[in-house]
Image (tube, rainbow, N blue to C red):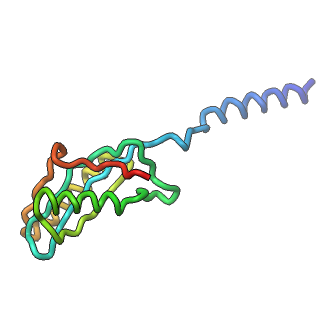
Amino acid sequence: MKFSRILLFSLLFFTLFSAFTMKNKDKDKPVYVFGIAASFADTVVYYTQVQLLDSVRLNKNGFLPQREVYASQLKSFLEYSKQKPNYTCMIYFSENKGKLEKEATKLQDRYRQNKSLVEPIDSVEFLFKKPQK
C-alpha cells in the first residue's frame, strides 16, 4: 500500500512538472533583420529599418540561414535602384527586436561620429525576401 502511494505520487509529480518544461522547440520564433551598406569611396552609409523575416528560423548554431542572399538583395537594390555600385552590405539579425534596434542605433552613431552621412532606406522601397530553395 505504501509503495503504491509513493509510485502514484511520483508518477503524478513527474507528469505535472514535465508538462511545464515541455516546449515546442520546432516552433518558429520571429527573426528580425536589418542591413547596412558602406563604401570606401563614398561617405554615404545606407541602412534599412529593422524588419521581420517571415517563416525563417535560425539554424542549430544560431545563425541566419542563407544570410549571404539577404546581403546580395540589399546590394542589388543599391546597384539598380540607387545607382550605387561597390557597396559592402552587412546583415545583422536577432530573435530579439529590442536588442537589434539598439545595435542598429549604435552602428548609426558610430558612422555619424566618423562624419559619414547615414541615410535610411524606407521599408516601402526595400524589403528582405525569403530566398527560394
Number of numbered discs visible in the structure rendering: 0
Residue nearest the viewer, comparing 16 with 60: 60
Question: Does 6 appear above or below 129?
Answer: above
**Horizontally, is 88 left or right of 14 in the view?**
left
User: For the point 31% across and 44% down, which residue is it?
Assistant: 52
**Horizontally, is 112 left or right of 97 in the view?**
left
Question: Does 117 appear above or below 31?
Answer: below
Residue nearest the viewer, comparing 68 with 76: 76
**Horizontally, is 7 left or right of 61 in the view?**
right
User: For the point 44% across and 43% down, which residue is it?
Assistant: 29
Instruction: Please identify the residue farthest to the right as the structure is shown.
Output: 1
Question: Does 59 appear above or below 45?
Answer: above
Could you say where residue 73 lies in the image, as x and y percent from the top left? 27, 57
User: For the point 31% across and 48% down, which residue is it?
Assistant: 129
User: For the point 15% across and 71% down, which residue is it?
Assistant: 39
- Which quadrant holds the N terminus? top right
Could you say where residue 32 lies in the image, as x and y percent from the top left? 33, 48
Could you say where residue 48 lies in the image, as x and y percent from the top left? 20, 53
Instruction: Please identify the residue farthest to the bottom as the structure is shown.
Output: 40
Residue nearest the viewer, comparing 17 with 65: 65
